[in-house]
Amino acid sequence: MRRKPVNSASVRSIGWQDGTLEVEFVSGDVYQYFEVSEFTYAALVRSDSIGRFINTRIKPHHDFKEV
């Protein structure tokens, strides 16, 4: 999946395709979060804090796997 760089202290890049959100953290770890709507992804891209959005709106509500 193609990811784009983001301006964040904890996240290096993000990408979305067919309901899967892929997040590369600054640690180098990459996770995929499932059943993430395009609307939620758009809100993530526009958010003031990518890391906080992921911690509050993605992690608690979506299944995931480490890639």
Image: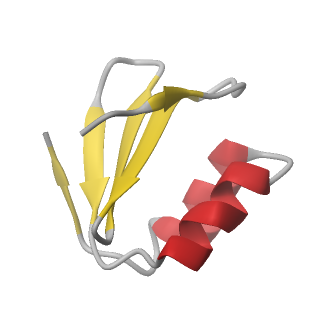
Q: Is residue 14 placed above or below 63 in the rendered structure?
A: above
Total residue callouts: 0
Where does residue 59 sit, x and y in percent of width and height? Answer: 45, 66
Question: What sort of colour scheme is used for the picture?
Answer: secondary structure
- Of residue 59 and residue 34, the one placed in the foreground of this image is 34
Task: Judge from the rendering whether residue 17 lies leftward or rightward of residue 46; answer left or right.
Answer: left
**Residue shown at 78% from the left, 54% from the top:** 46
Residue 66 appears in the figure:
yes
| Residue 54 drawn at (x, y percent) | 57, 57
Question: Is 16 situated left or right of 67 in this image?
Answer: right
Given residues 42 and 33, the one toward you in this image is 42
| Image spot of residue 23 (x, y percent) | 40, 41
Give the residue at the far right of this rendering.
48
- Asked whether residue 12 is in view, the answer is no
Q: Quadrant of residue 41?
A: bottom right
Q: Residue at point 66% right, 58% down?
A: 44
Q: Quadrant of the N terminus?
A: top left
Check the image and report above or below for 44 versus 58.
above
Of 38 and 23, nearer the camera is: 38
Which residue does the image show at 50% across and 73% down from the upper left?
A: 38
Going 28% across and 34% down the picture, which residue do you hit?
30
Please state, as top left, top right, bottom left or bottom right, where the C terminus lies in the image.
Answer: top left
